[in-house]
Image: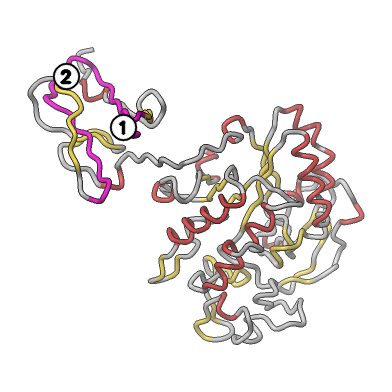
Amino acid sequence: MNNFSWQDSVYSDGNKEFLALVKSKKGNFLKIKIRMYKKNDLKIIYLITAPEGERIYTPMKIIKEEELLWFSQSGLSKITPLEYFNFRYYLDFKEIKWLNKSVFYQILPDRFYDGNSQTNVKDDEYFYDNYPAKISKWGENPKDYKNGHHLDFFGGDLEGIKKKIPYFKALGINALYLNPIFLSPSNHKYDTQDYFQIDPHFGTNEEFANLVKLLHQNKISIILDGVFNHTGMAHYWFNKSNFYLKEGAYQNIKSPYGEYFTFYDYPEDYHTWRDVKTLPKLNYQSLKLCKVIYQAEDSIAKFWLKAPYNIDGWRLDVANMLARQGEFQGYKEVWREFRKEIKKVNQDAYILGEHFYDPGELLQGDMLDAAMNYQGFSL
């Protein structure tokens, strides 16, 4: 105990032991506690609030004379901490009750289980980016991009997920996270071709609705992967692959979808996700795009949350990159709006964002519910 400092004992957080809403006839107030070793050198502790932007200092408890110290999420300091580190309490924040007891199982559908061989991709069924689609035998090693070009398919599908429900239950799984399942020419499907259609090699929209219904009957929740930062070049909004007769932004910048993308030297020089030409990045400066992605009642995000699909939330691909492009940094506004619109449909919908760095600014209670990344998972 010779090296022990009372400063190392200081602790507070947002659980009910330290933060409680007390209701009375005079109004509601918060009871806030901070815990520390009783033999310390403090004179006074101030609770700092800023209800209208100006700081208010309220003494909490007098102990004995010593220098003023500040305690925030960054710990103790002798100087005023940045507002970023303030503790926050959202009066109207609603806990997602089903989430706390959930054990998730992540599924890349093509590689999970082939439940219906009739829906499998056939060799040379189509060409994408000048490469042919190829079926692989179950059990053989997946090909790298140089040899497979993301077009080697194993045949996993929705029927395969359905048949494995007893397996999930035996494992103690009660929530699924599916990697993208919407129409796409690749095996990973992060290059969406149509957000409103289940890829036919996985099944149909009706089959997906039935799968969700069956999962819910077995007390298993399900969230889908929303790739809303970019589309694939085959998407009918862009249509560089010429899969559609109707002109996309690539054929005609004055098409209804021209403002969804950013062109620098039309048509070949356009903004992409990390310079991948098959993944044109969406332009959230377009109000029309915001409506179709999440604002309108028939928007993509709401479409799958509503009947007959009733999914339980979204895992959002590269959430740290969406609505950020040069001087335009509208990501916080977009995520705040996204949250409001999603929670209107289902207050218990889970909003999980992929973020490979510090996600703190998006986890303040008014944007994402949580963050994930594969790098952290692998540590």
Inspect the magenta stretch and tell me whether residue 125 lies in it: no
Give the amino acid type for the residue marked by disc 1 in the picture.
Lys
Residue 82 location (% of width, % of height): 25, 47
Total numbered labels placed on residues in the image: 2
Q: Nearest the camera: 22 or 224?
A: 22
Which residue is labeled 2 in the image? 40
| Disc number placed over residue 26 in the picture, else none | 1
Mark 2 neighbour class, 10 Å CA radius: few under 14, some 14 to 19, many 20 or more? some
Point 50% across, 40% down: residue: 94
State the SS at label 2.
loop
Comparing labels 1 and 2, the label whose residue is closer to the camera: 1
Q: Quadrant of residue 45?
A: top left
| Residue at screen point 73% across, 33% down | 219
Crowd tier of the residue under label 1, counting other residues whose Cα lies within 10 Å: few below 14, some 14–19, many 20 or above: few
Decide: is 290 above or below 221: below
Q: Which mark is residue 147?
A: none
Which numbered disc flags the more N-terminal residue, 1 or 2? Answer: 1
Q: Residue furthest right?
A: 118
Left or right of 364 in this view: 217: right
Q: Which residues are magenta?
A: 24-53
Farthest residue to the front: give it.
25
- Relative height, residue 270 to residue 223 (above, below): below
Where is residue 327 shown, x and y percent of the image?
A: 38, 71
338 above or below 8?
below
Q: Nearer the viewer, residue 360 or 351?
A: 351
Which residue ends up furthest to the top in the rendered image?
Answer: 1
Q: Amino acid at mark 2?
A: Asn
Comparing 242 with 290, the one in front is 290
